[in-house]
Image: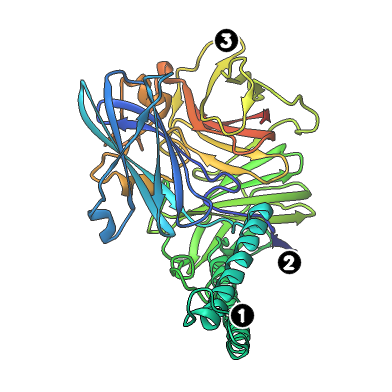
Amino acid sequence: MRRTLLFLAALPAFAHVGSPDVFLEGAAGPYQLFVTVRPPTVIPGVADIEIRSSTPGISRIRITPMPLTGEGSKYPPKPDEARRTKEDAQFFSGSLWIMATGSWQVRVEAEGSAGRGVLSVPVPAVATRTTTMDLTLGGTLFVLMMVLVAGIVSIIGAGVREAQLEPGAAPPAGNRRRARIAMAGSAVFVAALIYLGNSWWTAEAKAYSNNVYRPLNATVGVDGNRLTLRLANSTGSVRRRFDDFLADRKVDDFIPDHGHLMHLYVLRWPEMDRVWHLHPDMAGSGLFEQNLPAMPAGDYRLYGDVVHSSGFPETVVAELKTAGIVGAPLEGDDAAGAGPPVSEGPADTTAANLGDGWKMIWDRGNAPLKAGAAMLFRFHLEDAQGRRPSDMELYMGMPGHAAFVRTDGAVFAHVHPSGSVAMPALALANPGGSAPAGGSMANAAGGSMAGMDMAHMTMSGAISEVAFPYGFPQPGEYRIIIQMKRGGTVETGMFNALVSR
C-alpha cells in the first residue's frame, strides 16, 4: 500500500500562526462593541486594549483582566477605566497587566444611557519571545556600575585609612597598608557579588526562555488516503521555574469548536490555488484521523486548530509532499475550494468567480490595507445579474468562515464572524448562553444573537453577507479564503490582498 509521509514544519505556531492579536465583535448588553486586545509578547506584560462602540450613548467603559477558568475567574480585581479619545467619542483604549501564562479574559463593562452591559473577551497569554537590553542602555549601565564599584572600594579604603585620625592628620604607613589590603579585599568581594549576580541572572534568563511558547509536536502520515496526526507536548521534559501551564498541556482534553475537535486547513503550496477545510476525528489520546479527498500531486501545508478544555487555542502546522492521493468523497462539514494561483493574479482582488454562475464579492472600499489596523472584512454572494441569493444557510452554525494566510506562511488565522477568538473559549468567558454572535448577521438581526441556537437556522436573502473582524499583523501579500453556504453547497472564494505598513 502506498504510504505518503508528512513532516512537521518549522514554523512558529500559536492560537493563530503569526497573528497574536485578538479581535471580537459582540454585544455588551445593549451596546455593540468591536474589541481588539494586543497581548504582551513577554509574561508578565502589558496588554493593550482598544474598544470601538457602534452604539451611541456610552458614558464609561471599565476593563478587568482575570483568568478564564479556575478560582481566579471568580474573584476579579478592581477594574481599570478605559480612556475615551478626544478625536472619537465612540473609541476607548486602555492597558492591563497579564501576570501569568495561560487562558485569560478581559472583562469589558460598558455603562451609558441604555444601562449596563458586560462582554468578556478570551485572551491566550504566553511569552512568544525573550527581550534583550538595548546596547546603548547596557553600556551606560555598565559604566555606572563601574563607577559604583570604584566608589565602594574607595570609601572602604578611606574609612580604614583615615576614619580614626584627627582632622588634617596625615595617615601613617600602617593605615595606608591596611587600607590597600581592605580595598583589595573589598574589590574581590564586590567582583564575586557581580559574578554571582550575573550567574543568577543568566540562570533566570535561561529558565524564562524555557517558558517561551512552543507549539505541540505533530507526527503525521498518510497511509493510502488515511491521514493520521499524533500530537505530543513539546515542553513536557523542560525544567520550568515560573509556571507549568505549557509543560502541563494535555493532548486529550480538547473541546469541540462548531462540533469538531479539530479544524484542519490543507493548502496547496506555494500557489494556494487549492484548499480543503477538513475535520479529523479523534481516535485516541492526541491521535486524529481523516479520510483525505482526492488530491493532485504537489506540496501542501496543513494548519490544524484545536482548543484545550481551559479555553487555550493552538494551531499545529505540518507539510505534505505527495505524488497524488486517490481519495474519498467529502462528507459532513468537509469542504473544498479552488482559485487562481497567487502568482498569476493581481496583488489585490475584490471578486472571485465560483464556477457555477455565482461570484463572491469583497466589499472592501478604496482605502489601502495597513498592518496593525483592526477592520471588518465584508463579503457577499451574487449571481451574474448582481442579485443576492435567497437560499443562504449557516455553515457549521456561522454565516461563514475565513482564513487569512500570508503567502510566505508566516501568518495563518481562522476567523469567524464574531472574531478571531475560539468559540469554546468565548462560551467559557460568557457563560449562561450569553456568548455574543458578532458580525453582520447579528447586526442584520437587529442586535446580539446571544443565547440563540444557530445550528439549524437558515439565512434569508436579507442576511446574505458576512463580516469578519480582523487586522493584518504584518505587511506583505496575503490570500484570504472565505467560505459561505448556499443551497446546500459550501462556496469558497479566494482573494489576494496587499498589505502595507
Give residue 187's position: percent from left, percent from top: 61, 80
Task: Decide which of 284, 269 is in the foreground and name it.
Answer: 269
The kind of secondary structure element at disc 2 is loop
Q: CA distance from mark 1 to mark 3?
A: 84 Å
Of circles 1 and 2, which is in front?
1
* The N terminus, quarter of image: bottom right
Q: What amino acid does circle 3 point to? A: Gly
Q: Which residue sits at x=48%, y=47%?
A: 39
Q: Are marks 1 and 3 in contact (CB under 8 Å)?
A: no
**Pointer 2 or 3: first along the chain:** 2
**Pointer 1 or 2: first along the chain:** 2
* The C terminus, quarter of image: top right
Q: Report whether residue 237 is seen.
A: no
**Crowd rating for badge 1 (residues with CA inside 10 Å; few <14, some 14–19, many 20+):** some
Whether residue 85 is situated above or below residue 473 in the rendered picture: above
Q: Quadrant of residue 361?
A: top right
Judged left or right of residue 12, residue 272 is right
Whether residue 111 is situated above or below residue 225 in the rendered picture: above
In the picture of the structure, the residue carrying the numbered disc 3 is 386
Q: Which residue sits at x=62%, y=83%?
A: 188
The kind of secondary structure element at disc 1 is helix
In the picture of the structure, the residue carrying the numbered disc 1 is 187
Q: What amino acid does circle 1 point to? A: Ala
Give residue 165's position: percent from left, percent from top: 49, 81
Q: Are marks 2 and 3 in contact (CB under 8 Å)?
A: no
**Crowd rating for badge 3 (residues with CA inside 10 Å; few <14, some 14–19, many 20+):** few
In the picture of the structure, the residue carrying the numbered disc 2 is 1
